[in-house]
Image: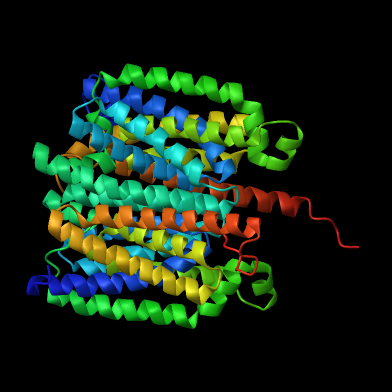
Amino acid sequence: MFASFMVNTWVVGTIVAIVAGVVGFFVVLRGSSFVAHAIPNAAFAGAAGASLLGASTVGGLLAFAVAGALGIGALSSRGRHDVATALAVVTMLGLGSLFLSFSTQYAPEIYSLLFGEVLGISSSELAPTMVLGVVTILAVAVWYRPFLLTSVTPELAEARGVHSPRVQLVFLLIVAVATTMAVPVVGALLMFSLMIGPPAAARCFTTTPLLAIGLSVVFALVGVWAAIALSYVTDWPIGFFVGVTGAASYLLGRAYAAWHRSRVVQGLDPDGPPAVAI
Amino acid sequence: MGGWWSHVVEPGFFSSEVVRTAVVAGGVVAAISGVVGVFTVLRGQSFAGHSLGDISATGGSGAFLLGINPLFGFVGMGLIAAGCMEALGVRRERGRDVATGIVLGAALGISALLLYFDTTVHNTTGAAVTVLFGSLFAITTSVVPVVIACSVGLLAVVLVLYRPLLLSSLSDDIAAARGIPVRLMAVLFVLTMAVAVALAATAVGAVLSTALLIGPSATALRITKRPGTAMLAAALIGVVTVWVGCLLAYDSFYWPPVRHGWPVSFFIVALVLVCYVAADLGRRWWNRRVSTRYTPVAP
């Protein structure tokens, strides 16, 4: 499991989990799950297009993820946000199906782009992943306060001169970069689970933002490590384990929140912080 | 038939059995998606609508593995997922967002496993692509009567629920004050949507099910504010889009770069997007015209 050909997997998986945990906290806080689902799908179309043109996969992923983010931003400025996202995702998938029908690519490669592939992460993929990961974390650190302010109290943010649509666009771009980084390992569809399950679980345990981000990263790390190990042992796809551990951690969080609330109601723990289940 | 006509409609379009099945099934599915879609857009549940499409496709790959009728897999999984979303979701909009996300994430994971088994057990490699994208031209003829029957049933349900559902979609509070069971309406609607989306996903694939659910309805709601008219318009736009898409896909067998045709999903999605953007631009143009005509003279 820790053989030399698995080292890259563990390293990349760890980076992906940290980034997903951090970015995912804001995805959940801002109620942007649909966007977090749409952008990886767009990226998938990009990968299909890149393989058709013989361009680099990461380039295709990044180009389409960013195009998807900008498209959602543009469409939602003049209509309902969820409608804009839905239209963007089907457009991207329509393009993806067009590219796939032109290419003669072998089906398992498509499968691994969608659902992830533990083995076969080459050392040349390591550097771009690290760079994109660091860029994402730095961007989140820089925009930490505007992100929090616009998601928790939009009116206050407006009053302070924070331009909400611009902050939203920056946020979409960050999700796009994080996605690009993660697709080769966990796959387009499962990056989404990783950005929703652990952060949503973390928010059941605490309402303090930094603590929640920390917990979210911990859950994501445990989930990804468990997924890599189980996938290695059983030979089942890593995506399955990522998806299931994500949902399981959320159910755990909900159970804790319910238990905590009942204690507060009974007066057993009056000083404890109110756990907010979302 | 003049010369130009044979270029617009390549010979054999109307006599092809495959095309006839696609036109009938696609049309029915587009109509019912348009009707249900207006409520989906009004209630802001596009994400749930899209997720149910992906999730019912998971059921499809499960049915493929077990060797049972895919329609049962699609509809069964869709209903289970809708139940889970309602059970997890709390009333606030963001809670609903997370609940949908969690269910979708778990289902995608299961989907990964099922497709993996499909590949190893049945030794067919194209399952992932087929289940996700589907193809209008790959419908088995035997499914069509079932799809039509279910769609008629759904239409009846929507008509019966029309007024209370509409009121609770526009304002929960007013609906509750009038004695409408808002919670029950929400559950009934999600279940209705699950069946509609699952039918569409069986017939045209998960991607197109979202396109037909959201695109025509959002377009129609740009054109008119009356819900009833919007439903008719959405159904009409959906049906026309699907039919034109079929026609273009049929023609594209003669197009470069590969001579096996472009995917029909691509054409339908592109048409849906064009309709929406056109309706949006038209609406803005109309609003500007109206506002300039009635600009009050400054005192």
The residue positioned 36% from the left and 52% from the top of the image is B105
Above or below B207: residue A3: below
The quadrant of the picture occupied by the N terminus of chain A is: bottom left
Question: Which quarter of the picture shows residue A77?
Answer: bottom right
Query: In this view of the protein, can residue A50 be seen by the observer?
Result: no
Q: Position of residue B20 (x, y in %)?
A: 28, 21
Q: Residue A39 lies in what quarter of the image? A: bottom left
The quarter in which the C terminus of chain A is drawn is bottom right
User: On the picture, is A46 further left or further right than B117?
Assistant: right
Could you say which quadrant of the image residue A224 lies in?
A: bottom left
Residue B92 x, y percent position in the rendering? 60, 51
Residue at image point 25% right, 75% down: A129
Query: Is residue B145 in view?
Result: yes
Q: Is residue B249 left or right of residue A91?
A: left
- Asked if residue B159 is positioned above or below residue B200 in the image, the reply reads above
Where is residue B41? Give x, y as percent. Answer: 54, 42
Farthest residue, direction right: B299
Drawn side of residue B22 relative to residue A87, left or right: left
Residue B289, how many percent across, how many down? 68, 51
Q: How many marks?
A: 0
Q: Which residue occupies 25% across, 40% down?
A: B131
Residue closer to the observer: B223 or A271: A271
State whether residue A39 is above or below residue B39.
below
Left or right placement of residue B5 versus residue A125 in this view = right
